[in-house]
Structures are given as structure tokens and as C-alpha cells.
Image (cartoon, rainbow, N blue to C red):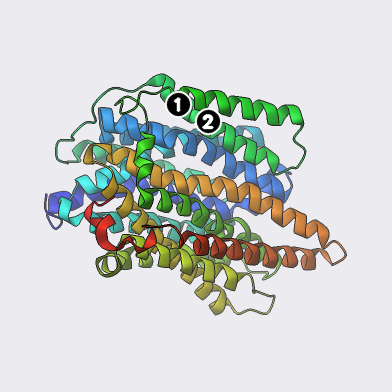
Amino acid sequence: MNAFHPTGWRSFATIGLGTMVVPLDSAVNVAFPAITSAFGVPDSGIQWVIVCYVITNATLLLVFGRVGDLFGHLAVFRAGLAISALAFLGSGMAETFEILLITRAVQGIGAAMVLSCGPALATAAFDPTERVRALSSYAAVLGFAMTIGPSLGGLLVEHWGWSAVFWFRLPIALAALAASSAVLIPRQVHAPGRLDAGNALALATALGAVLVGVSRARYGTMTALEISIYAAVFSAAVVVLRRAPRGGDNAVIAFSMFRSVRLSLVTATGIVVNLVGFAVMLFVPFYFVRTASLPVSLAGLLLAASPLGIVIGGQAAPYLTRRLGAPLTALWGAAVVGVATAWIGFWHPGVSVGLMGTAALLHGLGLGLYQVAQLDVSTAVLPPHNRGVAGALVMLTRTFGVVLAASSLTALFVFIEADAQHLAPDGAFLSAFQKTFLMAASGLGAFLGLSLLVPGGWLGGRAAQNGGP
């Protein structure tokens, strides 16, 4: 199916519309202050609105990627849209914070189904020679939705309250579900084997134990017994995973794939880049309200600069990968994220709106470059019948980074703010904001510096995009 064929673009449009319900979750970030106020929870409690969503997302992405490879990417994608629609309905009607958290977890399930198979469907809609362009277009959809999410969320919260950031996605999910019956893609080459339910459960359990443990560790009050329980659950799950036959076709993920230096490197770096990158969505909304004193609508518009940068970076990525190769493009993208994060760390009460928007735009540009290059490396390394797992693995690094950011960066922020209690409340917040961003940027810079020492990694050139290991 040619990349310019109208049928391919019509199918891609439906896939993109359905995918948009996930990144449009960026509208929820603008509603953080309103949600904490409505339910009477402290600012730090907002992390659970994030964690409940991304933990279910992260633990199930690879499982649903494998299910899509076995039984059909489109079927899993459509089921995800249906579940998402029900979850949006539940969140919009939530009357307690606990109910909101439960429905957020259900949203994570639907998002995992949509995102695990979305990249595979996007590449299937076009000719294989147009893989990078298809992936950049898919990344553009993600970035565009994230771009309009904050500004749209600001307007919705301002006029209709926090619940509107869930209600508006319900008709989008239903429309995409209805249109998906007309999606035309080439006959899928299904992966060999079957779904090993025990292996899938073990993988989800192992990921869940790590993510929940990291989230709980944020409070610094975990007992030795609780730590032992998480460790025991994780260890038991790993034992089950290791029992999967070598070279077997039934496991959710073949760990032998990580023998590829490039795949291992971009996966590990993806977690770190997304951990640092999510600091913008996590803390900047509070900066706009508490330090810059911006109206919600303007705050949402500025917050959209980073996702807009993702769109621009994603569209520039195919040109850079052709000249530099996907690995080096990913490295440059990660470096740009680090520079922009450090720049944000120097914001102060007198910084202009223009400079804030420019820093956020640069931040998104780096993320866009990295995400497309990472998708290119992953889909090139893995065989075509594992496209669901390849896409899910990339999405997993994003959600894993978000969970780590919601826990570790929040813990760091709270610690620094508490240490600055000799200052006025606004001064303590600003000090914590600046130091958190500068330390996050320094950590990313150190990680990238060490990664340059990995043989056959970033300097692998164009081989990754041509299918080399």
C-alpha cells in the first residue's frame, strides 16, 4: 500500500483519531490544581492520578502487544477504544477521589491496548519502504494531541470544571471505534506460537511490583516487611519468566532480543529521557499558577509548547535519520531534552512568557526526535511479526519513565522544598522547582556521557534503520 494512496491515509486517519484519546490525557495535567482542590487532597497527592493510570498501562503494554501479534492488532486496538470510552464516562462521573483513581486505572488498560498496537497499524497502512515516515506521522499525531490537550484542558477547566477533561474524549473514542470497522490494512502476518498466560501474568506482576514499590518508596515510610513483600513478588515473577524455553514462541517477550546493543541502549535511554522529560508536565503547571501567576487558559497554551515541539521534532526526524542514522538522531534528541530541562531550571519570577514558551518548545523538539528514532531502531531490529511487541516496548519506556518521574522527581521536589522552609512558601517552591530541573538535567547529561562508552551503540550509523542489529 503506497504511502500516498488515499486508502492508506484514510486508514491512518482512523488509527490516528483513536490514538489521540491517549495523548489527549495531557489535558488532565492542567486540571491538577483543580482536582486537588475539588477533592481536598494535598498537591503531592496528585501523583496518584498519574500513577494509577500509568502503572496499569505499563504492566500491560507488552502483554497486549503480544496479543496483537498473535490475534490481530486491529482487534486489540478496537477493544482498547471501547474500554477507554467506558473509563472516560466513569472518571467524568467520579464523586470521590478513590473512584477517580479506579477509573484512571481502567483508562490505563484501554490506553495500553491502543498504544501497544497503534504503531504496528500505522506502519501496516503504508508501504514498508516508508516505515520512518509512517512512524514520524504517528508521532506527529501523538504530539499534536499533546499540543492541543493542555490549552483545550485549560479552557474546559475554566468553563466547565475538572471533569470536562475526561468528558470531551468520550465522543472521540466512540467515533474512532465506529470508523475502525472500515480500516483497510494488508493481511497481518501473525506471530508463531500462542499466548503463554502464565508468562504474561508473571511479566505484568514483575513490572507491577517494581512500579508500585517505586511509587510507595516516594513517601520514605516503607517498612522492611513491605520491601520484602515487593522483593519476593518480583523474584517469584522473575523465576517464572526465566522458565520460558529458550527460543520458545509463546513468551510475551523474548529476552534474547536485548542482545542487540542498539535496542538495549535506546530502551534504557528512553526510560531516562522520558523520566526527565515528564518533569515539565509534572511541575510546570504549578509554576505557572504559583510563581508566574498566569490565568489557566494562558498556562494551558504555554504548556502546549512542549507537545508542539514533539510534532516538529517528529517531522524532522526522518530527514535526520537518513543523514545521521537512527541511533545518532536519538542521541541528539536526548541531548536537546537535557539542555532544555536545564534552561527551565533557570526560570525565575521575571522570566518572559516568550522565553518560557521557547524553552518548552525546545524541550518537546528533543523528545520528538528521540521518540521517532527509538521507534525506528526498535522496529528495524525486531522481525515484522513482532511489530506489536516492538511498538509496545517503546511505549513502555515512556510510561515507565513517567512512573519514575511521578515518584522520584516528586520525592526530590518535596525534599528540597522541605529543606527550604526558612524561605517564604513561594520562595521554597521556586527553589525546589529550579533545583529539581537542574538535577534532572545533570543526571541525563551524566547518563548520556556514560552511554557514549558503549561499543557499537550510538555510533552505529545507519545500520539500525536498515534492519541491522
Q: Earlier in the sequence, mark 2 or mark 1?
A: 2
Which residue in the protein does label 2 denote? 206
Q: Residues within 10 Å of mark 1 (few under 14, many from 20)?
A: many
Point 64% across, 74% down: residue:
346
Image spot of residue 369 (x, y percent): 38, 63
Which residue in the protein does label 1 denote? 241
Q: Residues within 10 Å of mark 2 (few under 14, many from 20)?
A: many
**From this viewpoint, is residue 454 visible?**
yes
User: Which amino acid type is shown beneath numbered disc 1?
Assistant: Leu
Toward the right, the furthest residue is 422
Q: Is residue 59 left or right of residue 387?
A: right
**Rendered image quadrant of residue 114:** top left
Image spot of residue 185 (x, y percent): 17, 41
Point 67% across, 71% down: residue:
292
Q: Is residue 39 above or below residue 86?
A: below
| Element class at badge 2 | helix
Q: Is residue 387 above or below residue 311?
A: above
**From this viewpoint, is residue 162 visible?**
no
Q: Are marks 2 and 1 in contact (CB under 8 Å)?
A: yes
User: Which amino acid type is shown beneath numbered disc 2?
Assistant: Ala
Residues at marks 2 and 1, CA–CA distance in whole angstroms: 9 Å
